[in-house]
Amino acid sequence: MSRTLIAGNWKMNGLRESLSQVEAVAAAVGGGEASVTALLCLPATLVALGRAAAADSALRIGGETCHPNAKGAHTGDISAEMLADAGASHVIVGHSERRADHGETDSVVAAQASAALRAGLVPIICVGESLAEREAGQTLARVESQLAGSIPDGVGAGDFAIAYEPIWAIGTGKVANTDQIAEVHGAIRAWLAGRFDASGAETPILYGGSMNPANAAEILAVPNVNGGLIGGASLKADDFLSIYRAAI
Ligand code: PGA
């Protein structure tokens, strides 16, 4: 798989009728080896259907969260094994909306990432500061402490991806500027080199937060940006494909 990853995050959006968007992305991505991996992370109800809609294409399908356990008495939760069984290859863990809505702490996120690896999925581990933390000059300290707490022990640098998503840029139309993105992505890369030595260069670092067809090329050109995690603009095949093409 290519290190460059363009990942959509549909969040709590999408009914079966939305599978036409998956089919359109799959048709455009095609079946061959691609220099960029295209991935759509879908609500759990659509993972198996999305996998079927993307059959014969290089488009990957992922989940949006998973429980640390493989199975058990956890009403409403979904395990990494279930996502893998439905055809997922990746799963987002530690998205700021999950951290806020469900109280997921760094140690929960690390357990979720471990679960993903156990099931053969690639975890996309999300980190990012709030506006108050940025304004207080705490951005790098916050991101580094999330990395330290959310990346599980025993993982290899090439087995997971990081998504840097400043909370104030998610769904707001406010995009971090290229200097801000370069600073944080550079700090994440340096942190990974500290933890994994030279192989820390293998971890894809995605930017997320109001990425769209108009700003994608500029963001993707920033050093240490290896792709994107795209919410709103991933819901329409045409928008998602423009971002994907900007990465090629
Ligand atoms: P957005 O969401 O692109 O709609 O800002 C990004 C995300 O939350 O992953």
Image: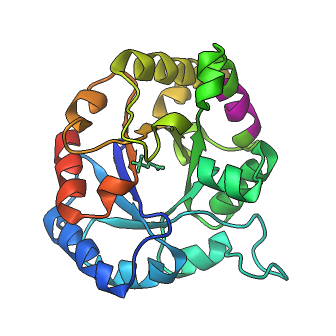
Q: Position of residue 93 (x, y in %)?
A: 62, 54
- Which image quadrant: the C terminus? top left
Tell me the residue at 38%/78% (across/down). Answer: 51
Q: Is 138 rendered above or below residue 113?
A: above
Quick check: 67 left or right of 227? right
Q: Position of residue 224 (x, y in %)?
A: 40, 25
Q: Position of residue 26 (x, y in %)?
A: 22, 70
Residue 183 in sight here: yes
Q: Which residues are magenta?
A: 143-149
Instruction: Say which quarter of the image contains residue 21.
Output: bottom left
Tell me the residue at 48%/24% (across/down). Answer: 185
Q: Is 189 rendered above or below residue 50?
A: above
Instruction: Say which quarter of the image contains residue 210.
Output: top left
Residue 1 in sight here: no
Q: Position of residue 30 (x, y in %)?
A: 17, 66
- Type of secondary structure dominating the magenta stretch: helix
Q: Compare residues 225 and 177 and report the one nearer the observer.
A: 177
In magenta stretch: residue 201: no
Q: Is 196 rendered above or below residue 4?
A: above
Tell me the residue at 71%/61% (across/down). Answer: 115
Colour scheme of this structure image?
rainbow
Q: Compare residues 154 and 232 and report the one nearer the observer.
A: 232
Quick check: 128 left or right of 212? right
